[in-house]
Image: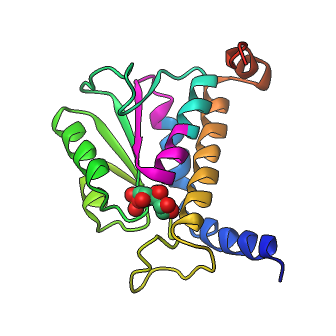
Amino acid sequence: MSKLKEILSEAKEVLERVDETAVTETAVLLAGGQRIFVVGEGRSGLMAKSFAMRMMHLGATVYVIGETITPSISPGDILVAVSGSGTTHGVVWTAQKARELGAFVIALTTDDGSPLGRSASRLLTIPAATKHRREGERRSVQPLGSLFDQCVHLVLDSVCLSYAELRGVDHAAAYKQHSNVE
Ligand SMILES: O=C([C@H](O)CO)[C@H](O)[C@H](O)COP(=O)(O)O
């Protein structure tokens, strides 16, 4: 099998096990109009940022934790936390702190029982391999958490698609929000 086909086959297997109702419900929650914050480290953080960018195009008020222009989090805000392992210190700490501050936390992780999973108000479980290759975790031919990253990206794009439908944002409206200084 070609490498590309192998990756597609791995991602398909994981995505078929993602709870689509949870994906739709996530979009409904986000379309509620609250401010959205995202957090993640490394490649998980890049997936979170990519989601934040598209949500901005779709009209959401969205911030990336750790950026200089990110304001304080308040009750009613939603934090989307991405961590394959669910144990990355900064992400777990941010999720716990956000809950204490009254925010709603949506976690994307492979492990519902992880510290991040246990800190979340709602889970979007992605049953992929992580960089730790823990016992019971899905196998992958790809290095580190690549399979998790790919699947998170597609799941969050699916959230974006539902969000766009719910908010009545079409391609033309999203395009208007796209940077015009690049
Ligand atoms: O960057 C990462 C690494 O390359 C694995 O693919 C991870 O995303 C980063 O280390 C954070 O880990 P998790 O919080 O377990 O996703």
Which percent across, then down, holds residue 107? 38, 51
Counting the numbered discs, the total is: 0
Q: 3 or 22, which is in the foreground?
A: 3
Residue 37 is one of the magenta-drawn residues: yes
Q: Is residue 31 visible?
A: yes
Q: Quadrant of the N terminus?
A: bottom right
Q: 66 or 71, which is in the foreground?
A: 66
Q: Is residue 17 above or below residue 67?
A: below
Q: Quadrant of the C terminus?
A: top right
* Quarter of the rendering containing residue 14: bottom right
Q: Residue at x 65, y 30 (%)?
A: 164
Judged from the image, the quadrant occupied by ligand 1 is bottom left
Which percent across, then down, holds residue 100? 16, 38
Q: Please name the colour scheme applied to the rendered image.
A: rainbow
Left or right: residue 126 versus residue 159 is left
Which percent across, then down, holds residue 135? 39, 86
Residue 158 is one of the magenta-drawn residues: no
Which percent across, then down, holds residue 74? 25, 24
Q: Residue at x 47, y 33 (%)?
A: 30
Q: Is residue 121 above or below residue 56?
A: below
Q: Residue at x 67, y 31 (%)?
A: 165
Left or right: residue 9 versus residue 95 is right
Extreme residue in the right direction:
2
Q: 134 or 36, which is in the foreground?
A: 134
Q: Is residue 125 visible?
A: no
* Quarter of the rendering containing residue 6: bottom right
For the record, the magenta segment spans 29-49
Extreme residue in the left direction:
100
Q: Residue at x 54, y 54 (%)?
A: 21
